[in-house]
Structures are given as structure tokens and as C-alpha cells.
Image (cartoon, helix red, strand yellow):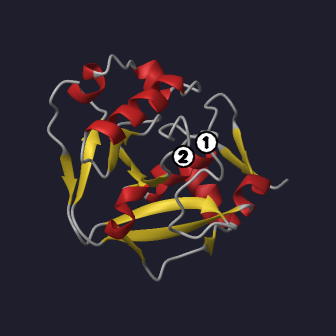
Amino acid sequence: MASIRLRRIDAGVRVHRIHRAEHSPIFFGPVGDTPQSRFDSPDGSYKVLYAARMLEMAFGETLVRTPETPYILSSGIEARVRSELETTRALRLYPLIDAGALAHGLSSTDLHGVEYLRCWEVSAEIHATTVADGILYTSRFDDHRCVALFDRAADAIAETTTKAIAIGAAQATVLARHYGKIFVES
């Protein structure tokens, strides 16, 4: 693997999560060993927490899964809540952007598509061969940054007072509109 300089997010920075209501704001998943999300461990040997630098990105990455679908259903929103976490120390993140992605032979389709096999493989390689706390990547919808934190970085994040807050219809409408979607009561 090519030598890539890790990126940093300083201590005291807030990140946003939209997560299932039954999970705590600090939840490293998935439950079980079967990977489900983009940078999950392919064999379940470590867990991953996903967050975004902006609430809109957390919403998009969690609820706007298929760009061709013109709406966001309230049933999907009602199953989730929003939380903010704060970094308690600097995070060291492996950048799967620019040269970091190219060093692994990853294309935009690999990083932003619906098939995650290559991302799981690269995540496992980064976890096994670096000291990174996780992965820095871009949202599938624009160039805003998101993070996938490995469970070994659990000490690097803390809950804030903004935790497990329901996303109301008005806020869901605004967030959906950010992506050109319509919020629909289901």
C-alpha cells in the first residue's frame, strides 16, 4: 500500500449522525458479522461508526440512498433520530479521497456505488496496516466530507447534549429539499 499522509480532525469538533432510534449516538455497527454499510469490516472483526461534518450530509448518506427516487418517506425518518458527537482528541483519518483512493485502485463507482465489496476490502486493509482511527471520504452526493470511524477510536468521541432527537416533518422537508427530494407522509 502506498504511503498516504493521514488527515486530522482536531479535538472539539462536532460531527453529525442520523441513526436508528434503537441505537445510541455512539454505535459501532453493524450488529453481527455481516457487513452492511460502505466501510464495514468484511469479516466482522471490527465495527464502524458513520458521521458527517454537516447534518445535511448525514441525512443524505443515511436516507437518500437512491438518487433516482424522488421522495423521502416519513416511515424512514420516523425510525431514525439525529445526534451530534464531539471529538475528544484529534482523529487520524485515512483519506479515501484524491490520491488515497487512487492508491487502492478505487474508482468513483467503487466509492459511491451500491456494491461495497471493494470498499470492505480496502477498509480491512486500512484497519490492519495503519494507525488510522478511521476513513475520511466524500459524500456520494457532493464533495462534503464524512467519516467512518473504527471502533478502536471509541475514546475519541463523546455524546453531546444534542442526542437522539426526532426529526420532525418540517426539518425532514428542508433536508429532503436540499437533495431535490420531496418529503412524503407515509
Relative height, residue 181 to residue 111 (above, below):
below
**Disc 1 residue type?**
Val
| 92 relative to 61 in the view: left or right | left
Q: Quadrant of the N terminus?
A: top left
Relative height, residue 108 to residue 44 (above, below):
above
| 117 relative to 86 in the view: left or right | right
Q: Give the distance between the C-alpha atoms of the residues marked 1 and 2, in whole angstroms.
A: 5 Å
Of all residues shown, which one is farthest toward the right? 186
Relative height, residue 141 to residue 51 (above, below):
above
Q: Which residue is mark 1?
A: 64
Of all residues shown, which one is farthest toward the bottom? 161
Name the disc covering residue 15, or none: none
In percent of width and height, residue 20 lies at: 66, 61
Relative depth, front residue between 78 and 107: 107
| 130 relative to 30 in the view: left or right | left
Residue lying at 70% horizontally and 64% vertically, measured from the top left: 169
Residue lying at 56% horizontally and 66% vertically, measured from the top left: 82
Question: Could you tell me if the residues under marks 1 and 2 are in contact, i.e. CB atoms within 8 Å?
Answer: yes
Q: Secondary structure at mark 1?
A: loop
Relative depth, front residue between 99 and 82: 99
Name the disc covering residue 60, or none: 2
Relative depth, front residue between 15 and 159: 159
In percent of width and height, residue 134 lies at: 34, 48
